[in-house]
Image (tube, helix red, strand yellow):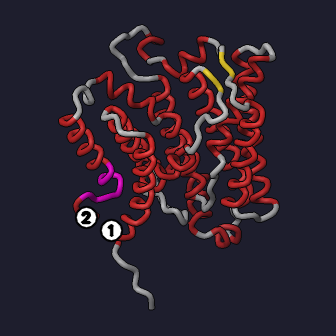
Amino acid sequence: MTKAFGTWERMLLALLVLLLAGFGLGIDGFMSPYALADSTFNFSEKGLLALAMALLIMAGEIDLSIAATLSLCSLAMGFAMKAGAGLPLMLLAAFGTGAAAGALNGWLVTAYRLPAIVVTIGSLSLYRGIALVVLGDQAITGYPEALSVLGNGYLGDLVGLPWLIVPIEFAILLLMAVFVGVLLHRTVTGRRLVAIGANPIASRFSGIEVDRHRFALFVFAGLMAALAAVLLTGRIGSTRPNIALGWELDAVTMVILGGVAIEGGRGSIVGVLLAALLLGLFTFALGMANISGIVMAMIVGILLIVSMVLPRLVRGPRVLL
């Protein structure tokens, strides 16, 4: 199988083509340009979370609180708006909250040598709990129109080209994917992150400041959660206590399905982006077919398991000596 496709990314690309062909034949209107453009709203914010998660997992860490951080950033925007702040201050509140939430995770992991999975499970409950306690069953609405344009608009509307039906959210996802991809695959910092994930002890002895890089990754995850919060809040027009609930599972699924090794030290951003496209289009097609959300959640769980097992089957069984 590896020889047939060459790389994991080519396999994902082949699956993406099969998915488009299959659902295109089975669902009326699925392959129309407008439907495909609108399908990107289904995964663009999740894709942003997955990009940050990919860097963390490649460095041997994980952040299960990233979706809860998103909800906290949206809450900060809502309070800033209610206090009379304009859009720039609302954005500052979101990104400041995201950076602070990520910094707390990074500080606990690096300063106290705590497992990231334990720390972020705790902060997941903390951040999500704050949103639930503060909002209760209420929602904050009335956001400015400019925010709605970010979440729901198209590039063509901004540049005066009506035929350019590329959502702004998707364009931002692509730009961030290019940035993260260049950082990971074309810079010294990226090579150091991969080295940390492959062998953190050897990385320390080679002079890499492991804790500083890990801390920076958690802050970056918080900033990406803030960016996703800005887009999602603008798209739905409100801040709700259950916003982005369970999205950490979707982000992890995109990362692992994209070929990033769960043990760290291996993976590519191209694979993560293809996995985001594959998973997003798949769930969008299921929605067009009126499949329930519970069934979709089950399928995401199955994909997560398969994406962890399949690479090992492709590489063949390991022989223990």
Q: Earlier in the sequence, mark 1 or mark 2?
A: 2
311 shown above or below 40: below
Q: On the image, numbered disc 2 is attached to which residue?
A: 1
Residues marked 1 and 2 touching at CB (< 8 Å): yes
Quadrant in the picture for the N terminus: bottom left
Tell me which amino acid carries mark 1.
Val
Residue 24 location, quadrant: top left
Residue 209 location, quadrant: bottom right
In this view, the residue in front, 269 or 290, is: 290
Gap in angstroms between the C-alphas marked 1 and 2: 7 Å
Q: Which element type, helix, strand or loop, lies under badge 1?
A: helix
60 shown above or below 158: below
Q: Looking at the image, can residue 213 be seen?
A: no
Q: On the image, numbered disc 1 is attached to which residue?
A: 314
Within-10-Å neighbours for mark 2: few <14, some 14–19, many 20+: few
Type of secondary structure dominating the magenta stretch: helix
* Residue 299 circle label: none
In this view, the residue in front, 187 or 261, is: 261
Q: Looking at the image, can residue 93 be seen?
A: yes
In this view, the residue in front, 47 or 208, is: 47
Q: Residue furthest left?
A: 25
Percent position of residue 174, x then y: 46, 34
